[in-house]
Each structure stands twice: as C-alpha cells, then as structure tokens.
Image (cartoon, grey):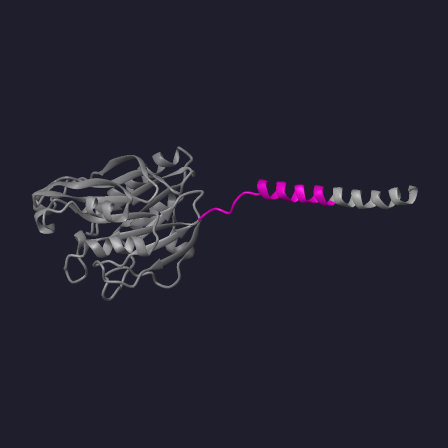
Amino acid sequence: MHSAFRDRRPASAAAGVVALVACAALGAAAAAPAAPQAARVLVLNMHAGKDAAGKPNLDAIAALIKSTRADAALLQEVDRNTARSGGVDQVAVLQKASGFDAAFAASLFHYDGGEYGIAILSRYGIGFHATVPLPVVPVQTRAGGSTEPRVALLAFVQRLPATPTWRVLNAHLDPAEGAARAQEIAHLVEAYQDAATAKAPVLVGGDFNSAPDNAVLQPLRAAGLRDAWSECGSGDGFTYPADTPAKRIDYLFLGDGVHCARAEVIDTQISDHRPLLVTLK
C-alpha cells in the first residue's frame, strides 16, 4: 500500500504541471493582441459616372467597390441630380448598391440643374463630416460661370468594427498649373493639421492634378504626410488617362499611425482615371 501511494504521487504531480502549463498557454493566448486587420481604401475620379469613352457606367463603379473589397472609397467628379447624368443622385445609387454609408460635399451647388462634387463611402459607417472650402485669390470662374471655390470633404470614418475612427480628407484640386492649386494645397494642409490634433489617424487623398515631382505637393510632405504609392507601390503608378496612362495624379497620403501594406493601380477604363487601391495596416 505504501508503494502504491508513492507510485500515484508523481503521476498526480505531472498531471498538475500539465494542467498549469495548459492554463498558462490559454492565458497567454487570450492576452496576446490580435493581429490588426487590413483596411482597403479606393481612390477614384469617377468622371461623373462615365467610362473612358464617356458611356454611363455607374453600376460598374459600384461593382468595382465590391470586387476590390474596399472598406472606404474617396470619389471625385460626382454628380447629384444633374441633367448630364440623367437627374440621378449618384451618391444615393452607389450607397444603395454597395450598402456603404456615404457623405458628399458640393463643389458646385448649381451645376446643370443639380450639384457636382466629391464623396466618401465607408463600409463601417461615417460619423461627423464637413465641407472644407479651398478658396483662392483671385477668385476663379469655373464651369457654368460659378465662382464657388473647390472644396475638400472631411469625414470621420469607421476603419473597422470596434476600432477608432480615422479622419479622412478627400479633395479634387485645380487642373491648371499656377497659384490656385498651391493655395488649395495650403488650405488642405491646414485642414490636415486641424484633424491631426485629435491624435487619430488621418488620410488625405483624391485627384490632385499634380505629378509626384511637382513642387506644389511639397507642403503635404513637409506637414508629415507620406505618399502611399512611394511607400508601398511598385512601378510608375500612372493613373491618367485610363486608356494610355502617362502620369500619376491620384493619391492617398498617410498621417502618423497609418502604415501601408500594398498599393496598386487597377487596369480598367471604368473612368477616364484608373483607380488607386491602397491596403493599410
């Protein structure tokens, strides 16, 4: 009996050790932080819902958002209820087709019977959003005789469920070389700096109508923004024109705390620009 008792003790001790190790392993697994989920951001000048040949294709743009598995989309040249777009509210159509939340900023309030501007779509919701004017001096006369300034759209975008919101700025800058675009960039930098005071991640993107070596973009870099394509893209990254791309004018710039895993230009003529898709981590 004494011998049998001695035989059982080591087995019991061993079992206890195994149990402790198992519990420790489970505890470590529970304590280990989950790897951050990637988020995809699409940047597209959508040419008022027309392809490179000028044919309406709003449904194809909605399909692109789905097929790329984008979590957010920064869109430029968006029409709401204009005659040229058949009186269609393009934001509402894309919102319904994608199931995303949406925000819109009008750059022209009275254009062809409707509005013209920029939009942000988000899979996981948009909280606060605001229009940021980008005024220039002297005042420019734009399409339809309007003297309204171009604008940026600021949106608080839910990156992923149960994660902090990102501040996202979307803009479509002046196509003409000269002082106007530089002034718009200066206002955009101010908007970025204001958004960054919250210590939340900030993205700044859109159609900037400027090649990467254009000095007009330098204030963005000086403010601490990083060009996603330079950080994680490969090749020239040309986005315009869509049929024979010859220059890179569409961007996503990253603020502190945002890191780029992959950047690609999608080979499609869904618009007169090719879409830029950036995967963030």
Q: Quarter-wise, where is residue 162 in the image?
A: top left
Instruction: Work out which quarter of the rendered image holds the N terminus and state it.
Output: top right
Q: Quarter-wise, where is residue 116 in the image?
A: top left
Position of residue 113 in the picture relative to residue 39 (left or right): left
Residue drawn at (29%, 53%), measured in percent from left and top? 65
Residue 25 in magenta stretch: yes
Position of residue 3 in the picture relative to residue 137 (left or right): right
Q: Quarter-wise, where is residue 150 in the image?
A: top left
Q: Residue furthest right?
A: 2
Q: Which residues fall within the magenta stretch? A: 18-37
Q: Nearer the viewer, residue 237 or 281?
A: 281
- Residue 253, horizontal then vertical, whole percent: 36, 48
Q: Nearer the viewer, residue 190 or 96?
A: 96
- Residue 202, horizontal then vertical, whole percent: 37, 41
Q: Residue furthest front?
A: 1
User: Can residue 275 be seen at all in this image of the molecule?
Assistant: yes
Report the number of discs: 0
Q: Is residue 255 above or below residue 127?
A: below
Residue 248 in magenta stretch: no
Dominant secondary structure of the residues highlighted in magenta in the image: helix
- Residue 238, horizontal then vertical, whole percent: 30, 61
Residue drawn at (83%, 42%), measured in percent from left and top? 9
Position of residue 76 in the picture relative to residue 223 (left or right): left
- Residue 16, horizontal then vertical, whole percent: 75, 42
User: Can residue 211 be seen at all in this image of the molecule?
Assistant: no
Residue drawn at (79%, 43%), measured in percent from left and top? 12
